[in-house]
Amino acid sequence: MKTIWDRLRSEDRVLSLCTIAIAISLFLPWHTYAILSIKGTTDGFHSWGLLTAFGVLLMAFVLTSEGRVFARYTPKISLAAWRVIGALVMFAGAALYLTIGPGSYHSSEVPVNYGPAFGAYAAFLIGLAALLLTFRQGRKPIE
């Protein structure tokens, strides 16, 4: 692990910390519900949160592998493009979870309360930061 960390650039280190933070947020409550007297939460491994989990796996693979792997199997897509794709998938899963949700229950006879929880918001904000960071990595430095 130390050799992988030493090989990463400073931007990739920040991106890997964002990926770890999103991976941790998948275990936090993403959705709360209360039906009658039953209250509960669900984590990020449901519905659109699975898309975020796939993005975390893709980003972890991109950050820990060398460019040779991607150059051999996907010669037309650069490693920077794979970073953007991974960050976009992480962000899109959290954004879709916040907008669409994991599903809903509608009844006029039973009082129901449900909505997103802090884990989804944390994954959304960290995913947005990771996506903006990957877009910034593609720029040339100002001289």
Image (tube, rainbow, N blue to C red):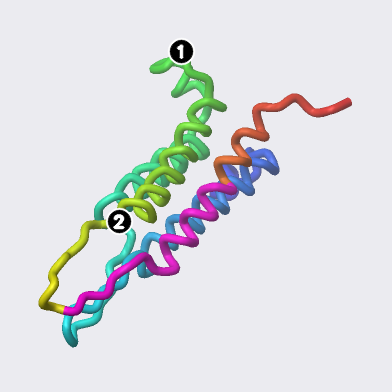
Instruction: Identify residue type, mark 2.
Output: Gly
Q: State the image coordinates of residue 43 (x, y, percent, origin top left).
A: 31, 65
Seen in the picture, residue 101 relative to 92 is either above or below; the reply is below
**Earlier along the polypeptide chain: callout 2 or callout 1?**
1
Q: Which mark is residue 15?
A: none
Q: What residue is drawn where x is 17% and y is 65%?
A: 105
Instruction: Identify residue type, mark 1.
Output: Pro
- Element carrying mark 2: loop
Q: State the image coordinates of residue 30 (x, y, percent, origin top left).
A: 36, 65
- Quadrant of the rendered structure where residue 55 is? top left
Residue lying at the far top of the rendered structure: 76
- Element carrying mark 1: loop
Q: State the image coordinates of residue 95 (x, y, percent, origin top left).
A: 42, 49
Task: Identify the residue under disc 2.
Answer: 101
Residue lying at the far left of the rendered structure: 109
Seen in the picture, residue 3 relative to 116 is either above or below; the reply is above
Q: CA distance from mark 2 to mark 1?
A: 37 Å
Q: Is residue 5 left or right of residue 140?
A: left
125 in magenta: yes
Number of residues whose C-alpha sits closer than 10 Å to that of mark 2, classed few (under 14), some (14–19) or many (20 or more): many
Q: Is residue 64 left or right of residue 89?
A: right
Q: Which mark is residue 75?
A: 1
Observer-nearest residue: 66 or 27? 27
- Main SS type for the magenta part? helix
Quadrant location of the C terminus in the rendered image? top right
- Quadrant of the rendered structure where residue 107 is? bottom left
Question: Where are the magenta residues, as a range?
Answer: 111-129
Q: State the image coordinates of residue 3 (x, y, percent, origin top left).
A: 59, 44
Q: Nearer the viewer, mark 2 or mark 1?
A: 2
Q: What residue is drawn where x is 63% and y is 38%?
A: 7
Observer-nearest residue: 81 or 39? 39
Q: What residue is drawn where x is 28% and y is 68%?
A: 42
